[in-house]
Amino acid sequence: MEGLLMKKNTPLLEVKNIVKRFGGVYALRGASLKLFPQEVLALLGDNGAGKSTMIKIISGYLQPDEGEIFFEGKKVVFSSPAHARSMGIETVYQDLALFGVLDVTTNLFMGRERHRLGVLQKKAMEKETLSILNKLKTTIKSIHQKVKFLSGGQQHAVAIGRSVYVGGTPKVIIMDEPTAGLGVEESQKVLELIKQLKEKDISVILISHNLEHVFCVADRIVVLRSGEVVGERLVSETNQSEVVHMMMGVNC
Amino acid sequence: MLSRTEVNVILFFVILFVALGIFSPNFLDLFNLVNLTRQISLYAIIAVGETLVMTLGGIDLSVGSVLALAGVLSAIFRLSLGNLAIVMAIGVGVACGLANGFLVSKLRINPFIVTLGMLNIARGIVLVITKGFPIPIYEGSIITLGQGSFFSVPYLFLFMLGVGILGIFLLGRTTYGNYVKAIGSNESAAWAMGIDVQRIKITTYTISGLLSGLAGVLLAGRLSAGQANAGIGWELDVIAAVIIGGTSLAGGEGSVLGTLFGAALLGIIRNGLVLFGVSMYWQTIVIGLILVGGVALGTLRELRG
C-alpha cells in the first residue's frame, strides 16, 4: 500500500484522520486520503459510507470534529466554502447548488461577480457567459433564462461551468455524482470534460455510483465503508468486482 | 428592462390614475394629490426595506412598531437634543433591525417569530413611554421634513424617490443585491458559493429597521406628534404592497420598482374609494381582493409558462 502511495511524489491535498459526528452518529471515523497532482481520484462507497461528508469537509462546507487537512504541503483549516474556493478548491455538489429563480449568468458568477466597488459589471459577465457556454457545448438558448427552466443536463452544465471556468483556474475540482440523472450522451460529455481537466493540470475528486464511469476516467480509487477508508487501488490494478467487494465488505 | 409583473403593476396604476382623474372631480385636485403622495411615500419607504427582507426569504413584521418607537423618541428628545434627536430615533430603528437580523441569522430563529416579538416589544416600549398619549411637536426640522415641500412636491415624496432609487440600485446592480436573491433562492447553495449569509441577513434586516425609523420620524413630523398608535397594522399593508409589486413570498425574486408602484396602487385605490364615499369597511375588503386576485393572476401566468 505504501509503495502505491509513493508512486507519485508529494500530494496536492492530504486529509488525515478526519472524524465527523452528527449528533451521536459518526459519519467519518478517522478517514484519511491523499490527492496527487494531475490525478482523478474516485471516492467510492455504499450509501451512508461518508463520501459526501468527506467532500463537504474538503470543500469547507462542513468543519471536521477532528483531523487535519494539508493543501500544497501546508496545514489548512477551511472555515467556509469561500475559504476553500479562494485557495482553488471547487465543488460541483450533488444537488448542483443552483439558484433556480436566477438566470444563467447570475448563477455562473455567484460569489465571483465581476464588479467595481460592489457594482456589478453585467455586460462583462454576460459576454463571459457566452464564451463559457460555448466551451461547455450546451444547448442553452438564452443566458437570461431562469435556471429552473433548464433541462437536467443544462443545469449540470451550469454547475460544472461555474466551478471550472469562472474565477481563474482551480487546482482541485470535487464532483459529487456529476453524471447522476444524465443521459448517455450528456454523461460522456462530463467524462470527457474530466479528462480535459486532468490534461490542464487540475486534480479531480469524483464520487459516482456508476463504476463504468469511474473505471473510464479515474486513476485511483479509495473505498469508504462506515466512515472509514477500507481500501485503495490503482484503477489499472483492479477490476469492478474487487471494488464492489471492498464496498460491501463481503464476498458475493 | 422591466419584468412582466413590473409592467403590469405600473399599467394597472396608470389606468386607475387616469380613470380616477376622469370620473372623480376631486382626485386631480392639488390638495388631494399632495396629501395622497405624502401617505403613499411613508408606506413606500418602509416597503423598500421589506422588499429586500422578503427577497432574502425573510419577513419583517416589526416595521409598524419600530416606526412608532422612532417617531415617539424623536418627539421626546427633540427638546433636549435638537436635530440630533432625528439621528437618534433613526439609530433606534437601526438597533431594532440589527437585533432582528442577529436573532434570525446567528440564532437561526424563524424571522416570523423574531419580528412578531419585536412588533410587540417595540409597541410595548412606546406605550410604556407615552402611556398612550401623543407627544406633540410644535416646531423644528422634524415638522419641516414631514410637512414641507419643494414647489408643491412634498419632501416626503423626495425621500421616497431617493430611497426607491437606492433600493432599485442595491437590489438590481450590486453584489449585495445578488447575494440577497441568492440566499432567498437557495440558502445552502449561497453558503456553498462562498457568500457570507449571516452578514447579508443582518445587513438586510438592519436596512429595514433604518427605513422604518426614518419613516417614523417623517410621520411624526407629518402628524406634528409622536403617536403611540402610529403604524398599527402597517406591516400588513406594506407586505401587501411588496407582493402586489411582484416580489415573491418564497424569496429569491424581488422588485423595488414594483413595490413603489404596489404602494402607490394601494394608496390610490384607498383614495378613490374615499372620494366615492365608500365606507372604510368596504375599503379593506377591496384591498384584500386585489391582493389575492393579483397574486392569483401571477401564479396562473407562471403555471402556463
Image (cartoon, coloured by chain):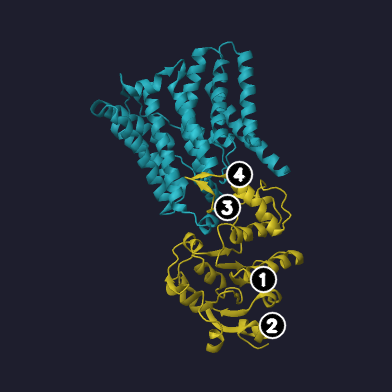
Chain colours: A yellow, B cyan
Residue under numbered circle 2? A240
Residue under numbered circle 3? A109
Residue A69: image location, x then y, percent = 46, 73
Q: Is mark 1 on a helix, strand or loop?
A: helix
Instruction: Name which of mark 1 and mark 4 comes first in the sequence.
Output: 4
Q: Do labels 3 and 1 share a chain?
A: yes
Q: Which of marks 3 and 1 is in front?
A: 1
Kind of residue indicated by mark 4: Lys
Indicate the chain on which mark 3 is placed.
A
Give the quarter of the figure containing the C terminus of chain A.
Answer: bottom right
Q: Front-most of A207 and A227?
A: A207
Instruction: Name which of mark 2 and mark 3 comes first in the sequence.
Output: 3
Kind of residue indicated by mark 2: Gln
Write the residue at 60% across / 54% down: A108
* Distance between the alpha carbons at the discs numbered 1 and 4: 32 Å
| Rendered view: B278 above or below A9 | above
Q: Front-most of B203 and A127?
A: A127
Q: What element carries label 4?
A: helix
Give the quarter of the figure containing the N terminus of chain A.
Answer: bottom right
Kind of residue indicated by mark 1: Lys
